[in-house]
Image (tube, rainbow, N blue to C red):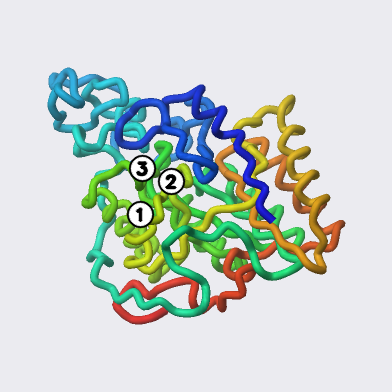
Amino acid sequence: MKLELCFSLIFALLTNAHSGDDHGAPKIVGARQFLSEIKSRSNLLKSTDITTVHRSSVKRQTSDGRCGPGLGSCTNCCSPDGYCGTGPDYCTSPDCQYKYGPQCDANVKPAGSSTANIPRPHIGSVPYGGAGIYDCVTPGTVAVTFDDGPYLYTADVLDKFKRYNAKATFFITGNNLNKGPIDVTPAWSNVIKRMVSEGHQVASHTWSHQSLDKVDSETFQNQIIYNEMAFRNILGYFPTYMRPPYSQCAEDNCGSKMSRLGYHVVYFDVDTAGYLNDDASLIQKSKNIWDKAIAGVKPSTDSLLEIEHDIHYQTAYNLTDYILQSMYSKGFKSVTIGECLGDPAANWYRSGNNSRF
């Protein structure tokens, strides 16, 4: 079943905040592009939320002045508006102009050796790279997936899943939204360890959420490898599953690269658009989308692959409970993406030390 709900196509016309390399309005590339992003800059982490952010959170403009295409580079960060400085307004990814600011989140490399030379054999029956995966294959399952975290609400989302003995998959971004790198920020490394210990699946959503269809080859590689290194630093291994930012990963370019890197590229067939409805007065719209999706399937024959975002308050504290209660009342079970695809857990990760996990 493919319920490709294109609410984000409307959203793309309303925002230019997260457009990848060219810092303009997102380009609509068909039904596969779903801009699952923040609708308000006010939702970003404040400097007081996480005390281990890797740079000074004091906002200031340096003597470098202006930066960006045709203007030159900074010694620190280059803001989306083309000013040099430090702090969240300048350095936060994915908006910081990383080509012109060496301290942008995208350029902060995790500690330790690179994972680039680790063997990446294709194991199992789930396809790697290519056009990607949109549907589960195991009847009676719903693969609930969360993008863009971990974040302030993620631990509470885990609590909700624990009450239902339910499992999810978390597509993790390594260093975005001013939250600090996941491997050196204890709040994030601890919650990632908790995900694994409680039976959830962790997967990659790239290092700093740049569009993989809009970056050069070096940045593409860094977006994948840096996140692997961070996972390795936390867990000792890294995922074989990923979801591309903005769901942008052209089959003949990005898809081919992801195959060579040994990744299953995962999309979805249900999008409740919770990121557009992050308000108590709006979240019912997302519930209605879910109700329509679950009403059209039977646990004896069908399954769903659903996308949410644990960085949004209403999703974490309202919509998640609603979805879990609904699916279980209708005879479905919330599982990891690997389980819904019939892929053994041994295939979900690779060892970070040149041996198979």
Q: Is residue 99 left or right of residue 266?
A: left
Q: Is residue 74 left or right of residue 156?
A: left
The three-letter code of the residue at mark 2 reads Gln
Asked if 158 appears above or below 81 in the picture, the reply is below
Q: Is residue 3 left or right of residue 240?
A: right
The residue singled out by tag 2 in the image is 248
Q: Secondary structure at mark 1?
A: helix
Q: CA distance from mark 2 to mark 3?
A: 10 Å
The disc, 2 or 3, on the residue closer to the chain's N-terminal end is 3
Residue 66 lies in what quarter of the image? top left
Residue 253 location in percent, x, y? 33, 54
In the image, farthest residue toward the right: 329
Residue 264 location in percent, x, y? 46, 65
The three-letter code of the residue at mark 3 reads Gln
| Labels 1 & 2 near each other (Cβ < 8 A) | yes
Residue 254 — which label? 1
The residue singled out by tag 3 in the image is 210
